[in-house]
Image (cartoon, rainbow, N blue to C red):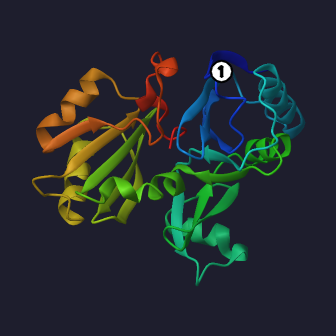
Amino acid sequence: MPYIKKTLLTTEAYDAVHDKRLSISLAADGFSFAVISSQGDLLAFGQAEGSHSPTMTDATRDIKAYFNEVGIRPIGFRRMELTVMSNESVWVPDEVFSPASAREYLKVVGGESRSVLTAQCKTLASTAVYAANEVLVTAFKVALPGLTAHNQHVRMASLVALGKDHPVLLSHWREDMVDLAAFVAGRYVYGNTLRMADESALRYQLIEVVRTFGLDQSDSEFMMCGDVDRKRYALYQPYFPKVSLYTGCCNVGPEFRQVHTYRYALALS
């Protein structure tokens, strides 16, 4: 089933800027994307809705058709990257990482997926081994030659600047999962994906993360993005000195005022 164009916004400067990157964030029912200049300015934002085709041929066709429809050609980008949401993931230091053992690394944390992917993270000098839809990821790479893929933990680990001045616990909410990344003194100190089956148990786990990794300081900040509504935002305010919405790290102009940037923060980072 072809993807449906839900949102497409661009700036007048889009065609004039040649040094830019394409950032895509994959979701269960489509994907969002952003075109960002080397200066960090958001040039274009879009959403595609629809079921992902199960075969590589059909998925590749749908991806190509969508980007052709919105007028974005996969050439001339400094970098193209795809962020994949994964429920099973483990970090392996680069000095001991072996591609042949990827499936075994994931089994250590209980991962049972037959489709295992890897992505190197220069920030941590480590490789993320994660479970994902390999057919779909490969289809994106075929449709957009030169594109690299990583999971949400690699993306979040790269945002160490968030915790440079004060401790930060970044949370990305999706379906019944929450992805976490903790930063203290400009260092990534923790990352994980937790299930949200029991809200009170989840709050307890978050408080334990705060205590364990040195986030229990007067200037600590809990940043939320993804599937966050007012009720969820208010629920966590009593537990942290400061709660805020993370909206990505690019410069967003008035052309994008209708976009709830915190919902698509990983694509906008």
Judge by depth and name the residue closer to the eye, 157 or 227.
157
Q: Residues within 10 Å of mark 1 (few under 14, many from 20)?
A: some
Observer able to see residue 213: yes
Q: Quadrant of the N terminus?
A: top right
In the visual, does 231 lie left or right of 157? left
8 above or below 143? Answer: above
Q: Residue furthest right?
A: 57
Residue drawn at x 61%, y 23% as measured from the top left: 11
Residue at far bottom of view = 95
Taking the spot 67% from the left edge, 78% from the top edge, the residue there is 98
Image mark count: 1
Of the pair 247 and 118, the residue shown nearer to us: 247
Report the front residue among 227 and 208: 227
Q: Dividing the picture into quarters, in which one does residue 32 lie? A: top right
In this view, 137 is above or below 208: above
Residue 16 spot, x, y in % from top left? 71, 32
* Residue at (64, 54) in percent of width and height: 113
Q: Is residue 204 left or right of residue 81?
A: left
Three-letter amino acid code at disc 1?
Glu
Query: Quadrant location of residue 13?
Result: top right
Q: Which residue is mark 1?
A: 49
Numbered disc 1: secondary structure? strand
Report the residue at 68% width, 36% height from top: 17
Q: Position of residue 62 (x, y in %)?
A: 82, 27
The image shows residue 150, relative to residue 45, as above or below, that is below
Residue 43 image offset from top left, x and y in percent: 60, 30
Residue 25 visible? The answer is no
Residue 153 placement (x, y as % from top left) = 49, 54
